[in-house]
Image (tube, coloured by chain):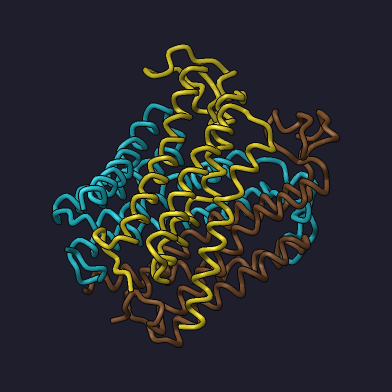
Chain colours: A cyan, B yellow, C brown
Amino acid sequence: MPSIELTDPVFRVYAIAAAVMILKVMSMSWLTVVRMLRANGGYRSPEDTKKTLLNPEASATQTDPVEGVERVRRIHLNDLENVPFFLAAGFLFVLTGPSLLLAQVLFYGYVVTRLLHFLAYLTAQTHDVRATLWTPGSLIVLYMAGQVLWSAFVA
Amino acid sequence: MPSIELTDPVFRVYAIAAAVMILKVMSMSWLTVVRMLRANGGYRSPEDTKKTLLNPEASATQTDPVEGVERVRRIHLNDLENVPFFLAAGFLFVLTGPSLLLAQVLFYGYVVTRLLHFLAYLTAQTHDVRATLWTPGSLIVLYMAGQVLWSAFVA
Amino acid sequence: MPSIELTDPVFRVYAIAAAVMILKVMSMSWLTVVRMLRANGGYRSPEDTKKTLLNPEASATQTDPVEGVERVRRIHLNDLENVPFFLAAGFLFVLTGPSLLLAQVLFYGYVVTRLLHFLAYLTAQTHDVRATLWTPGSLIVLYMAGQVLWSAFVA
């Protein structure tokens, strides 16, 4: 049985993949900030059009949608729909005792395809490309959750 | 004290409920895909109106909102507001050492009411019905988090 | 090595912070409900304008956006972008074996700044104030995830 420790080979792979994905999702907020500052707009709250130290050139149009900002928000929402469930399913999947190789394929496969999906979305590739890069990650989480269910029932 | 293993009776109930909920939430993305394909629209990104292999009948109206698709997105968002916190609160709640019966009532009660909430939302039942089916799940998570807080303070 | 038990001093601090944050996020749904009832509107689904027991004064305008409700939804979305990753990163961070003091500073620092961010957002303080109160929490999660990555690699 794998133990919940960073020295356990399988759990270690999970922890690395989880940490990378957490850093990735948290970076989306900062990317939104960078793009809002660059566009001097794309804000969402009425009070965001007030003149302040960080917003010297205030204008009522600053809450109008800006596509470059909205794009990062869509990417961010896609992360919220996927990554929390990867984090939870991956943790429980470790407890089913997978081989190190399988864990590496699934956890690192998830990270790689999610990062490629991010690049495809950010650079506005076609929906086909984006869907193709989204699918493996979704199937990996579904497989892991299914395996947890199976292991819990036969346990 | 319960141990974090799929063979532990209480943790096993948690793992089953967690896996079912993860499968449920991840399915929402696929249901969105199915409905977008059926409507040939409801997309969100400007590049999604381009003609591609998977989108032979491209049209500028494909990013107009489609109610059937938006409904699944609202259901999905409702899941994001609830399920990640169930997954985390449930895990910590197991560590408070509840009886197997209490764990079964709370974890399986959560799963059943959330699935009924999904059906009510998908079939556009009244707000009253939806709210009635949403409330137990919310109270279960609040109770579990409260119990964790209590146990941590008296520990 | 810290153990995953509520009696472990470091894990206990994590569990308290996690439980408070879960209670906080779950409360956002109830705050949305309170504000929708008070405004008798701000609903999102077409069926929500139907006359029912809980909605005796039904009207087609009830799905128009209401700023007081939308504000809570923005706060809620901000939570979804942050708290699930705090919960996951914090759990893994405990496994890196931080000192109790560091754990207290990071976990309680996160809780305090997030609650202040909530108050600032709810009362429509300037974007500068909100950003200042959001930043520490984001940096804490990034630091914890970075520490997990580092510990997993040198482990």
Task: Farthest residue to the right: give it.
Answer: C57
Task: Farthest residue to the top: give it.
Answer: B57
- Establish if A89 lies above or below C138: above
Is residue B57 left or right of A136 when viewed as pictured? Answer: right
Quadrant position of the C terminus of chain B in the picture: bottom left
Task: Farthest residue to the front: give it.
Answer: B101
Query: In the picture, residue C96 is in which quadrant?
Result: bottom left
Q: Which x, y percent locates residue C83?
A: 52, 61
- Establish if B123 lies above or below A60: above
Q: Which x, y percent locates residue B147?
A: 51, 70
- Establish if C120 lies above or below B83: below
Q: Residue at x 57, y 50 (%)?
A: B136
Quadrant position of the N terminus of chain B in the picture: bottom left
Q: Nearer the viewer, residue A67 or C43?
A: C43
Is residue A86 left or right of A5 when viewed as pictured? Answer: right
Q: Residue at x 49, y 71 (%)?
A: B148
Q: Residue at x 27, y 42 (%)?
A: A143
Query: In the picture, residue A10 is in which quadrant?
Result: bottom left
Q: Which x, y percent locates residue C32?
A: 71, 51
Q: Which x, y percent locates residue C89?
A: 41, 66
Is residue A149 left or right of A34 when viewed as pictured? Answer: left
Q: Residue at x 31, y 46 (%)?
A: A145
The number of discs equals 0
